[in-house]
Amino acid sequence: MDKKVVLITGGSSGIGKSVGTYLTEKGYKVYGTTRNPNKHPDFSAFELIQLDVKLPESVQQAVSEVIAKASRLDVLINNAGVGITGPVEETPHEEILNVFDTNFHGPIHMMKAVLPQMRKQGGGLIINTTSIAGYMGLPFRGYYSATKGALNLVTESLRMETKKFGISITNLAPGDFATNIAAGRYHAPVIKDSAYEEDYQRSLDLMNEHVDAGGDPLQVAKKVHQIIQKKKTKVHYPVGEFTQRLSLLLKRVLPGRVYEKLLLNHYKL
């Protein structure tokens, strides 16, 4: 059988690069994407193509390029994303729109572009990278949680709508991993004498510590490989430290105010 063809958005660094490299080593034909391939002249782990997930015409061009080169597309991994932090009240609205364009609308553009090809070939797999943060509203990360939570629910819906075509769609929800996401994350400014100044700064410091101390992205790569090999996928695949995965169980079983108290204590609020 020919190699399975995998397309990974946001493949030039972080989790995307780790997943692409691992799958290439396992024998898959991997295409990664980046907004500017010229910034990665020495990249050799797998082929990079130009793509901006916020632009439907860029998405269509990239997908068409992959299909022209490989004649098929077996797996789409929607990995490209951006972080955002800030008080809900003080985050500039243009930044809210930007994070939704990348984290929510971007994957939708990608899925719309690949679904016709997957129907044509009689099947395919789409893995949407959401986040454990997408299962709960976190303080000072409300808009990030909202983008991932929205993608989570759309994935559930589309999974049922496309089941009869032999297409499988699933959510992969990582916790904190040691990547460069913090460097590219938008931070709403800590405003002096703001009502949120002290709490936001303390939470910001804590968030950065979590990313710096995060797990090896190779864990995510191995989980993706496991998912691709399955005949039937689950709806959700959380991946991260035990305490992060436990938080999802607690969210389901604890009364809302009790769970909220745990978060308040965690963030020292």
Image (cartoon, rainbow, N blue to C red):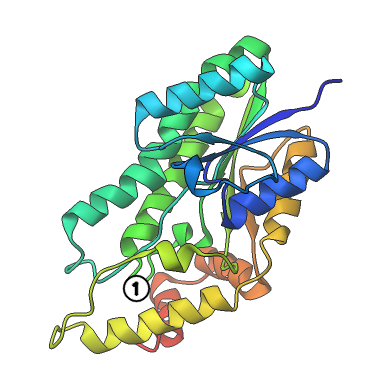
Type of the residue with mark 1:
Pro
Q: Which residue is mark 1?
A: 139
Q: Quadrant of the N terminus?
A: top right
Q: Position of residue 224 (x, y in %)?
A: 70, 47
* Number of marks in the rendered image: 1
- The residue lying toward the viewer, choosing from 19 and 162, is 19
Q: Position of residue 246 (x, y in %)?
A: 62, 70
252 relative to 213, above or below: above
Question: Can see residue 165?
Answer: no
Quarter-of-image position of residue 125: top right
- The residue lying toward the viewer, choosing from 137 and 90, is 90
Is 2 displayed left or right of 198 in the figure? right
185 relative to 154, above or below: below
The residue under the point 44% across, 41% down is 35
The residue under the point 44% across, 28% down is 59
Name, please, the residue furthest toward the right: 1
Question: Can see residue 5?
Answer: yes
The residue under the point 34% across, 32% down is 55
Is 228 displayed left or right of 99 in the figure? right
Mark 1 burial class by Cα count in 10 Å: few <14, some 14-19, many 20+: many
Q: Quadrant of the C terminus?
A: bottom left
Quarter-of-image position of residue 128: top right
106 relative to 201, above or below: above
Q: Position of residue 231 (x, y in %)?
A: 78, 32
Name, please, the residue furthest toward the top: 120
The residue under the point 50% across, 26% down is 62
Is 248 displayed left or right of 125 in the figure? left
